[in-house]
Image (cartoon, coloured by chain):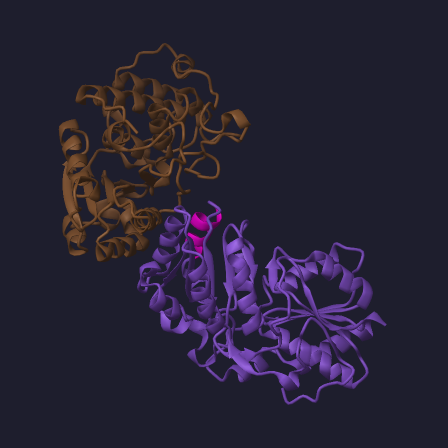
Amino acid sequence: MGIKTGTKVRYKNGILPSSEWKLELTRKAYGEMLVELGEKNPNIIVLDADLAESTYTKFFREKFPDRFIECGISEQDMMNTAAGLSTWGFIPFLSSYAIFLTGRAWDQMRNTIDYSNLNVKIAAAHGGISVGKDGCSHQGMEDLGNTLSLVNMTVVVPADYWETRKVMEWIPTHKGPLYMRLGREKVPMVTTEETPFLPKKAIEVVEGSDGTFISFGMMMSRAVQAAELLAEEGIYSRVLNMPMIKPIDEEAILEAARTTGAIVTIEEHSIYGGLGSIVARILIQSKYRVPTRIIGIPDIYLRSGDPEELLQIAGLTAQNAANKMKEALREAG
Amino acid sequence: MPTLNLSKEELIERSRLIRHDILISVNAAQSGHPGGPLSAADYHTALWMNYLNVDPKNPYWEERDRYLLSNGHCSALNFALMAHRGFFSRGYLLTFRSLNSRLQGHPSSVKLPGIEVGTGSLGQGLSVAHGMALGARMRGRPDILSFCNCGDGELQEGNIWEAVMHAGHRQTDNLILSVDWNNAQIDGYVENVKGVEPLVDKFEAFRWRVLVADGHNMDEIINAWEWAIDGTPRCGKGCGKPSVILFKTVMMKGCPSFENIPGWHGRPPKDDELMIMLSELGFKYTNVEEARVSLGEPIYDGYGAENGH
C-alpha cells in the first residue's frame, strides 16, 4: 500500500489494485464460515484448545454449543479426539496456532490422522512470522514443510478474507485430511467475491510476460505490489496465486516458466520445505530451467517486533521481490 | 449382534489357543512382540469372544462397539483375536508383517477392515477411542461402547493423561480402558524405568471408576468386564464416569520358562524357543512346520477378499 498503482498493470479474476485494498482478518472469515457451514451441514463440528477467542471458533461455539468440543490446552488430545469423531461421519474442524498443531501434535497428525486418511480439517491460526510481538515461540514458519510431507494431506493457504471464505465453502466437499493456514494480522483484501477458488489450480491474478511471481497467503499481496513496482519501470510480470500448495498446479508453474522466462516465489515460510522448494523441484526436472529466485524466511529465528519490521528482516517485501525479479530477468537475458 | 458367549472353561481354552497362534505368527514373521500379547491374552479373549459387539462379516456395521489397541505393538494379539472371532481364517496369521499382508507390524485401518484407526505410536489411542465414544454420544447412541487397551509403560506418554483428563471432565461413561499392567517395558521393569504408580489414585483423581483385577484369573476377568459394562449407558443411565480396569498380568504368561523377562517385549522366538513355548502351553509338535500347518492356509478370506482388496 502507498504504492502508486501502475496504470498498465492488468489485474485479473477480480483482483483489486493495491490502492483499493482494505484490511481484514482471515481467521474472522474462518469463524464466520464455520457458522454458515454448520447451519447447512449437521456433520460439521468444531474443536479448539483454549483459543476459541483467538481462532474465532467462538462464533460456532455460541451458535452450536453441542457441536463444539473444547479440549483445553491439549493439542495432541484434540488432534486425536477429532480423529475418533471423524470415524462417525462428522467433519471435525480443529484449531489452534500453526506452531503447536504442526509441531507438538505432528505425530498425532501423521500417525493417526494422515496415515489412516481420516476426514479431519486442521485450521491453524497464527501461521508465519507476522504473529509479531509474541516472539519466536508463537511464530509458525515450519508448518507447511511439516504438513506437505504428509502423504494424504491437502495443504491450503488462503490469501485474504474473501479467499478464506471461498476455501471454506469448498472444504466440506473434500474428503481426507486437510491443513489450512491462517494468519494473525489483518491482511489486505486483494481478492474479491468474484475471484474464483478451484482446488489444485493456480489463479492468475496479474497478467504479464516478464517473469512470474508465485505466491500464496498474505505474501500474494506483496507479489501484486512487486508487479506494480515493476510496471512503473515498464516491466510487466505475471502473478500467480497458489492457494493450494499440495496437490500443486504443476502445469501452471511450467506454463509460467515457458512463457515468462523467470520465476520468483515469495512465501512467509522457512526456505526449507515450502513453496520455493516445490517450484524448484518441478522446474529443475523440466525443460524449462529458467532463472529462479526463492524468497522465504532465511535460516534464522525471528523475535518480538511489529509484523512489518519482522517481514523486512526476512526480506519479505514487495521491493525485495521486485529486485529479485529484475535479477532473474537479467540472468534470463 | 450375538457374541460367541463362551463358558469360563471355553474362554480359558480359547486363550491358550490364541497364545499358541500369537507365538507361531511372531515366529513365522521372525519379527514382532510376543511379551505383551501373552500377558494381555486372557482378558482380551473374554472381551473379544463374549462382550465386544461386532459383526466380523461386516466390520463397518455402524452400531458396532469400537475397539482400539493403543499399544499397537501388541498387534499379534489383535490379529489373533480377530481370527478367532471370525474376521478371517487363522492361517492368515502366518503372513504377519510380510510385504503384501494386511497384518501390518502395527494395526492399520487402511490395510485391514476391522481395525478402527491405525495405532503404533504410543500414547495416542485413548484420545481416539474417547473421540469415538463422544461420537457415539453425539449420534444419540451412548449405548455403543468404545474400548481401548494400553500398556502400563505406555502410561508414561503425556498424551494419555490429556485423554484421561478429558474423558473424566466430560464424564464419558461409554469409554472403557483396560491396562495391561505387566510391569515390563523395553528397558526393564516399569517401576525402575519410570514408575507409573500409584495408578488407582491417579485415575480416581482424574474422575474415573477404577477396578484392579487379576488378568489371568478368568472369574475375576469376567467380573471386571461385567463391572465395566454395567457402568455404561448400555445398562441403564450410565454412571457418569469412564471406567478403567487395571489388569495385573505377567509378561509371556503361559510359558513359565520365559515369564516376566522384559527382554521378551519385542523379540521373536527362534524355532527352538518356539517349540519350548508351545510345549509349555501344552501343544506338542515334532517341528515348527507342523505347528504352522495347524493354523491352515495363509489366505485372506475376510471382508473385501472377494474384491481383491
Chain appearing in purple on the rendered image: A
| Residue A267 placement, left or right of B274 | right
Based on the picture, tell me whether residue A111 belongs to the magenta stretch: yes
Pinpoint residue A268: horizontal percent, then vertical percent: 57, 72
**Quadrant of res A308:** bottom right
**Quadrant of res A295:** bottom right
Judging depth in this view, the residue of B239 and A283 nearest the camera is B239
Q: Is residue B103 visible?
A: yes
Q: Residue furthest right?
A: A333
Task: Look at 77% across and 69% down and name the residue there.
Answer: A262
Compared to residue B243, the image places residue B226 above or below, namely above
Q: Quadrant location of the C terminus of chain A?
A: bottom right
Compared to residue B8, the image places residue A209 above or below, namely below
Judging depth in this view, the residue of B152 and A101 nearest the camera is A101
What's the magenta region? Answer: A106-115
Q: Is residue A310 visible?
A: no
Q: Main secondary structure of the magenta part?
A: helix
| Residue A144 placement, left or right of A320 | left
For chain B, what colour was chosen? Answer: brown
Pinpoint residue A214: horizontal percent, then vertical percent: 68, 68
Q: Residue furthest front?
A: A40
Task: Look at 50% across and 26% down and name the residue there.
Answer: B305
Based on the picture, tell me whether residue A281 belongs to the magenta stretch: no
Q: Quadrant location of the N terminus of chain A?
A: bottom right
Judging depth in this view, the residue of A116 and B272 nearest the camera is A116
